Image: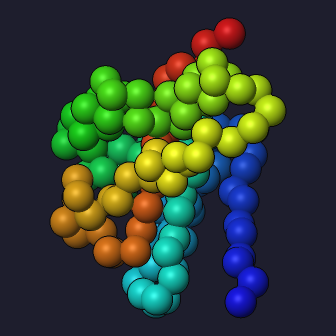
Amino acid sequence: MENSKYLIWNNKGGVGKTFLTYMLSVEYALIHPEEDVVVIDACPQSNVSEMILGGNGKGEDNLAKYRENDLTIAGYIKQRYERSKSSKLGNESSYFVEARRSNPNMPENLYLLLGDVDLGKS
């Protein structure tokens, strides 16, 4: 079976990227429980990560705990860059967070590669 991939991108703020990503990923996961759904949050603001992890306040706290342990997209990039710029680490899937662990309202098959403020640093 072919894996489907969807990308939501726009460089303008306020166009609904976070809401659309949240709604599409959760609804798709609910309708297709036999498939794993992975949201890759490549935004320094990490809004979709916060929403999936529990919403304002709780989601932010949950995200901070993962950031402390470098379990974010920036943590993965840093570790890969330090080890080898041209090969895989071999533990890529260990950076995928099971959304339900932090937010029991999420489907069991929804995973997240968390956003990180470090993506916005130069």
Q: Residue at x 63, y 18 (%)?
A: 82
Q: Is residue 31 visible?
A: yes
In the rendered picture of this protein, how many numbered marks are placed on residues?
A: 0
Pick the residue in front: 17 or 68.
68
Above or below 59: residue 2: below
Q: Is residue 60 visible?
A: no
- Residue 26, given in percent of the width and then of the height, sits at 43, 72
Above or below 108: residue 40: above
Q: Residue at x 36, y 44 (%)?
A: 50
Quarter that holds the N terminus: bottom right
Does 76 sit left or right of 105 as displayed? Answer: right
Residue furthest right in the image: 86
Q: Residue at x 40, y 74 (%)?
A: 109
Above or below 23: residue 9: above
Quarter that holds the C terminus: top right
Q: Residue at x 24, y 40 (%)?
A: 62
- Residue 93, given in percent of the width and then of the height, sits at 51, 54
Hey, which quadrant is residue 41 in on the image? top right
Pick the residue in front: 24 or 75.
75
Pick the residue in front: 115 or 85.
85
- Residue 48, given in percent of the width and then of the height, sits at 46, 49
Report the colour scheme. rainbow
Does 31 sit left or right of 63 as displayed? Answer: right
Pick the residue in front: 108 or 84.
84
Does 118 sit left or right of 106 as displayed? Answer: right
